[in-house]
Image (tube, rainbow, N blue to C red):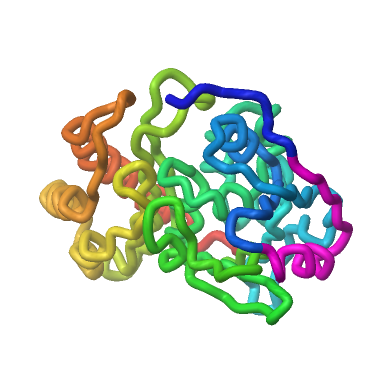
Amino acid sequence: MSQLRRLPKFEFVGPRSLAEVCALTAEAAAGEVLLLAGGTDAILQMRRRERTPRRVVGLKGVRDLAFVRETGEGGLAIGAMTTLAELLAAPLVRSRYALLCETAAQIGGIELRNVATVGGNVAGALPCADLPPALMALEARVKLSSRRGERWVPLDEFFPEFGRTAARDGELVSEIGLPRPAPGSGGAYLKFHDRHSMDMTVVGVSACVTRDAERGVVRDLRLAFASAAPTVFRARRAEALLRGAALTEQALEEVAEAACREADPRTSWRANREYRQALVRSLTKRAIGQAWAKAAANEGAPS
């Protein structure tokens, strides 16, 4: 682990609008500007000299990036500067996107959740981040904004490699969009960590299940993982095994084994590769089982 040092010298700018932010990042060279959201990871990166920006652009004053609202199609729009605490408190999230609440509640403590932002958790591209797997299982998209305009990228295509996102020069994450959950859906996020929620996730698994009530089978399954590969990822081959199938113990074993084959965990001081593979296997089965039970409870419930 790198030594923490004093922050390097930098110029701080506090814009008040998204247009100002886009203007500040438009002409900046790579690594020259750091966008500061909650700062829970960025400050540590600067103190470890992993990032040494000439200019830090603080986003706290950009209030048009902090919102949680329903879209015209009945989905959910989340501003990048929405804190985890604000996400947890939003009635629409609590009533319709319980998986997000369950996940956000497991991130850090109260103090951190009052500072950390949804956009920062996503844009940081950390493989151990907890929110991206839940958002990925809910089929989230990311809006990228710049002086050139806006474009949407599916979250499961947003992390091409370790520590990197699909954002181009001058682009920033401005919004997360989610579709309306299908009837009879349920989700679960399970993670293993050393002692408590303040510790970094060793392995995290998010599962979202949609039941076919008439046939008693899985209509759809989405699985996403944290700390099980160089990036957060969807286990698409594992998902496909359970679609249209009954949720038997044998089926769960096959899906869990397939997820292990798609995973590519590393050995670190927190856990070795073999232990992480065992966690992927165990947590996948448990997460699917819990998501299935929640989907059954949600059948016929108003959405």
Farthest residue toward the top?
195
Q: Quadrant of the N terminus?
A: top left
Residue 275 in sight: yes
Q: Residue at x 70, y 27 (%)?
A: 111
Query: Is 248 one of the magenta-colored residues?
Result: no
Image point (78%, 48%), residue name: 58
Q: Residue at x 34, y 56 (%)?
A: 223
Q: Please give the range of residues in magenta.
A: 10-28
Q: Position of residue 54 (x, y in %)?
A: 70, 48
Q: Residue reaching furthest right?
A: 16
Residue 156: image location, x then y, percent: 42, 65
Residue 42, relative to residue 213: is it above or below?
A: above
Image x and y of residue 164, in percent: 46, 57
Q: Is residue 111 above or below residue 281?
A: above
In the image, residue 22 lies in the stretch drawn in magenta: yes
* Residue 123 picture quarter: bottom right
Which image quadrant: the C terminus?
A: bottom right
Q: Residue at x 40, y 27 (%)?
A: 193
The residue nearer to you, when weighing 95 against 130, is: 130
Residue 199 coordinates in the image, percent (x, y)? 48, 25
Q: Nearer the viewer, residue 245 or 156?
A: 156
